[in-house]
Structure formats: C-alpha cells, structure tokens
Image (cartoon, coloured by chain):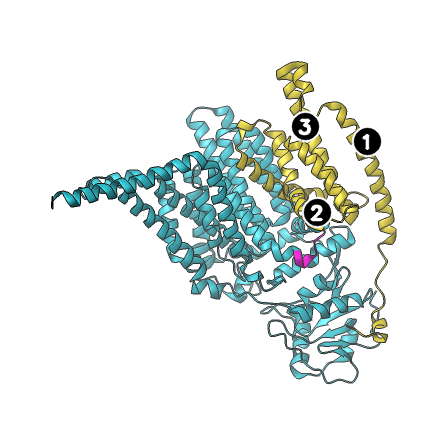
Amino acid sequence: MDLLAIVVVTLLIELLIYSVPLEPVRVALGVLFVLFFPGYVLVSALYPWREQLQGVERIALGLGLSLALVPLLGLALNFTPWGIRRQLSDTGQPRSGSTWSISRLQPRGAVRARRGGLAGFLTSPLPCPELRPARLNMLSHTLTQVYQGVSCISNSRQHRSLFLISLQRKPY
Amino acid sequence: VVLEAPKAEHRAVKAGTFGVISRGREIWGSHSGALRLTGLAGILLFSFWVGMSPHWDHPYPLHVDEWIHIGYAQSTLEYGRLEYPNPYNPREVSFHGEMGFHLLLGFLKTVTGLSWMDLYRFAPGVLLALLAFLTYAFGHRSGFGWAAALFVPLIPTSIRTLGPAFVVPVSAAMLFIPVTLLLLQTMEEESRGRSLWLLLVLIGGTIFIHPPTEAAITVLAILYLAGFVVAALAQKRYGEGANLLLAIGVRILIPVVIMGLWLPSLSRKVAEQSVSADSSSATGLLGLHAGFPQAFGTVAVVVSIAGLCLFTLRGEGVRSYVLPLFALLLLVFLAFFFPMYRLGPDVLYERGWLYLGFLMVIFAGFGTAFYFQSIPATAQLVASRIRLPPGGWMVISLWSAGVAVMLLALTTGIVVNEKRQTYAQYYHVINNLMFADFRWMGQHSGPGQMAAMGEPSLGWAYPPVAGPGAEVYQAVSAPWTNKAADKARAMLASGEADVPWLKKLGVSVFYTCRPRTFVCEDLENNNLFKVRGGVYLVPDFPDTR
C-alpha cells in the first residue's frame, strides 16, 4: 500500500506541477517527493519485509538515501542530451520515483507469489499487467521530454530587455 | 495517638506517591505509542524552533555561504549543466565541488515551486529537525534516540563553523552521519550485503554534496567495518572477514577514485594545501577555533563526557568502542594535531568541530537515557545506603534531578550562553529595500551587463536575488580581499567613482549600499547616472560578450 501511495502521489505531483495550481499541496508533496520517496522505495526494495527494519528506521533510511539519490539523478541528467533543464528536473524526478516504485512493487508481488502461489500473486499490491500502461506512459512522457528539451534549448536564449530601457521608465 | 499520626500521614503520602507513579505507568502502558509520537513531535518542533530562531524576523539567508550556493544552484538550473559561467566571475567556467548540493536545491525548488527566499527561510528549521529525527532513528533501538535528538540543537551554529541550521553543504552532508551509523548498526543485526550496497549509494550523495564530510564518514565506516572484521576473525569466520576486508578496500577506493577523476584539480589543491601552512587559508586568516566546548554548553559537555564513559562501558555491539574511538581521533586532530603541525585540510578542521558536536550529542543522549532507565535500580541503591525504605519519593526525586540537569544543559547551551551568542554572529546581508534594488537591477540587465558592489561581500547576494543570468563583477568577503575589492571599497569610502575603471571591467551598474548597516553612500561623479539612492548606472558600458 505504501508503494502504491507513492506511485499515486508521484502522478499527483506531475498534475500539481503542470495543471493544478495548488501551491501549498505542491510544496508539501514536493518536499516528500524529493526528500523521501526515492530513498524509501530503494529501502523497500532491499528490505521488503516489515520485520527487517522498524518503521522509524525505514523512514530515516528513506530520507537519508533520497538525499544521496537525488544528486546522483542530477548527475545522470547532466550526461543526457537535455541536461538539467527545469522541464527535466520536474519530470525526471516523477519518472524516477514511479519507475523505482514500480520496480519495487514487482518483486514484492513475485515474493508473495513464491510464498502463496497464484492466489498470493493475484493479491500482490500491483500485479504485472498494470506495469504495461505505466511503461507506455513513461515512453510517451519521454517523447514529451524530448520535445520539451528541444523547445527549451531553442528558447533558452530569450534574455531580458536591455538595461537602459529602464531609463525611459520610472524605476520602482 | 500522637505517635500513630505521623506514621499514618507517612503511609498516606507513600500511597499517594505510589498511586501517581502506578497511574503514570498505566497511562504510559496503554498509550505508549501515541505518547512516544507526541514526545518525538515535541522534540522535532523544538529543533525546528531553534533552527528558525534567527529567521522569524529576517526572511533572507544569513550567511554568505548560503547566498553563494543559491547563486550556483540557480546557474545550474539556468544553464542546465554542471559546467556554467560562474555567476560571481562570468569570465570563469564553474564546475563546483559541491554540485550535489546545488542539484538537491535545484530539484527542491523546481518540484515545490518555491522561490529561493522561501526555500531558504524555512529550510534551516527543517534541516535541524531532520538531523534530530535521524539521530532519534539511530538511537531508537538502543533506547537513547529521544535524548540524543533533544540535544541536537546544542551543536553550535555559527558564522565560522556554520552549523546544522545554516543551509549549506556541510549541514546537508551531516545528515548522512546518522544515516551511515544506522546502516552500520543494521549490519550488526541484518544482512550485511544489502547494507553495503546502501553504503555505496550514500558515498555517491555525500561526496558530491560535501567532500570533507565524506572523508569523515569514510574514516567512521572503515573503523566500524574493521570492528566487524575483528569480530569475524575472533569467531573464526574467515570467509566473512575476507569479504569485509574487501568491502573496506572498496569503501576507501570509491571516494578516492571519484575525487581523483571527477575533480582532479580540487583534489590536488586540497592535497597541496594539507601539507603547507598557507596564510590565505581560513585558519591562516582567522586563526584557530577557540571556545567550541563553551559554545556547546559546559553542562552539556559534562553530560557528554559522562555519556561517553557509559557508552564505552555499557554500550552495545561494535559501536560501543568504534564511536568513542572516532571521537577520540577527531578530538586529537582538532585539539592537538592540526594546531601543532598544521597538517590536514583546513576545511576538515573548520567543519570537524561539527562532527565532534554531533558525537557529543550522541554520548550526551546515551548518558541521559541510561540515567533515566537506571532510576528504579538507583532508587533501590540510594535507599539502601541511607537506610530508608525505597519509595516513590525517591524515584520522583531522581527523575526530577535528571530533568533538571537536562533543562540546565539545554538552557545553558542554547538560551543563556554568552559564547554561543558571540559565536553565532548572525548578520543580515540585505534588507527589503536592497532586495527590491537587486530585483530591479536584475530585471533591467541584459547579457554582458554586470553589476559591481561597492562592498564586494554584497556580491554574493546579488545573483540569487536578481534572478537567473544576473552577473556580478566579483564577490569577496572580509577578511579576504584583492586589488579590485580594495578599489571598490576605496570608491565607497571616498565617494568618488572611477568611471573609466568600471567601464574597463564591463560594469553597467554600481551599487553603493552597505550590508548590515544598510547605509547607502552617495557618489560624486557626474559621469554616473543616479537612479535611486545606492544605484548608479555607468553610461556607455561596453558589452563584454
């Protein structure tokens, strides 16, 4: 459920960034999204069972590892053709968040399937078929990012008006 | 009747005291989860409050280093690469050693949509609360998390050593210390392979956020892993020992390789500076630190030392001797080795005090929690010594004494601490008027149009406020200086502007207001166009691009 919630919030964040101007919600979820989700999902991947880590430790490792993963993601973006543009840093995070969450959900389902057979697999948090639309969504989004990257590069040199124009106007 | 009356009164008092204690235990037993959560929330709020205290009435960053990192983070986002024109020296290409911190800030800004000023206004409190929470998580299993978290705000936040309540790379990287300790602690009880992988991920974060902290964490992790090796060899688990030795090798190699390949010039510079007494370095100009223990609080230091002894004697697992050993090594480096021989990077000396402060917090927390856990046994012991029946009054007295010492440590460390007040000389770089000036200057500058500050330390604040693409001729904080900074300061002092010199530099606007006092000087030169107090335009400036 926790990982499913992360996927939902991740998609919600994208809506909040691009479509729905709800600033306080965006700030609250955005902070969680950058400083908590990536690490939490990684911890869940490595320690899938509740008894392996206490709740507080899981949260703490999630926070700490997010702080480590986010700069690494930025470094990776630096080596892409698009760089660390706003459009990519906005969307690269959600993509990575949901990708990591989905990658984590699958093994949990697989473990459950091993333990509980087909019934266990079917009751797993996110069965495999649901991954397909997510992957398609990612593909479409990647294409959108390519477009955004290109348009961003072409528009990035739109600089501000000349300084001395201000002489004609009242400064304040 | 006369003799019976005091006895009956004594019984009634005793029954009342025991009643209160047993009622308290009952409430704790039935609501322990909620009460723990409330207590933790209280501790985190306290940390947040301490972190925010200099910001309640000042909405802007305080330290020049905070401004610097906003400037670089803004340029990272603006240019979309890790290499970009240095906003503080546009003729230079920046490839900053703390780029991970800029990326973290950049992601936070773009995802939350906050402005830099809003982000920096609340980040100090959040950062300190986060450190308190991670410290709590580390000590949680051993039962001292709450006390250690409570003492986290004692770590001095000052202009010189910065501190956890300044939003700078060292504060963010300090968060990795409790996380690393938590992982290493997990390795004592859970699968080691998985934790080792996570340790490698953490290296990636720390080294790109703050390399000196990575050096400190590397030493800590190696000591810890060496402890595991010794334990494995003692139990004749040779295969496990060999694997751990390999892990130590990898743990040392990765940061060395990353620094060598990624930032070779910075690594070379730090290595050279480590073996030379460079007079332009921080310790060369500012001298050695003095008074860190006093800034931490004398009572808290005593509690920490007591806690250190208890931690060594009564602590659990490998950490019971690794952490004291690390603290001892750090203390030897900070108090004796560096001051005597000046060997080692300056930055490690400057920031090392913070790491020591963090370890002191852990020891103080352990000591405090140990004291409270030992109260029933102590009450029995004390009562037997003074030949009185152990009763609730004894427990309450010991409990009150513990609370009093804690409050004393916190009060003398944070509130009534002269050294801390002088140590934490917060200064206000800009005010609302200067903020408006910078915004306007940024909005009306084009490419190649640089601003220059009469007081060059103000230059650090210009690009973050003026906005993406804004450039300042240079930014220099006292006591550092150079010829151009001296010239700008002289112009401000004399009130006479050297317009040809400004034109030669490619400066389009000259700003004459001063930080802290916020006084704007008047310049007497008809060749400059005065827009408003403090803002002077240089006519016919050349386009340097």
Specify whether residue B285 is painted magenta: no
Mark 2 Cα shell of 10 Å, populated few (<14), some (14-19), many (≥20):
many
Distance from Cα at disc 2 to Cα at disc 3 = 25 Å
Disc 2 vs disc 1: which is toward the camera? Answer: 2
Q: Which amino acid does label 1 sit on?
A: Leu
- In this view, the residue in front, A160 or B112, is B112
- In this view, the residue in front, B349 or B375, is B375
Q: Position of residue B26 (x, y in %)?
A: 38, 35
Q: Bounds of the magenta span? A: B112-118
In cyan, which chain?
B
Disc 2 vs disc 3: which is toward the camera? Answer: 2
Between disc 1 and disc 3, whose residue precedes?
3
Look at the image and tell me in which quarter the N terminus of chain B lies.
Answer: top left
Specify whether residue B115 is painted magenta: yes
Residue occupied by mark 3: A105
Distance from Cα at disc 2 to Cα at disc 1 = 25 Å
Residue occupied by mark 2: A26
In yellow, which chain?
A
Distance from Cα at disc 1 to Cα at disc 3 = 17 Å
Residue occupied by mark 1: A136
Which residue is at 60% across, 38% downward? A62
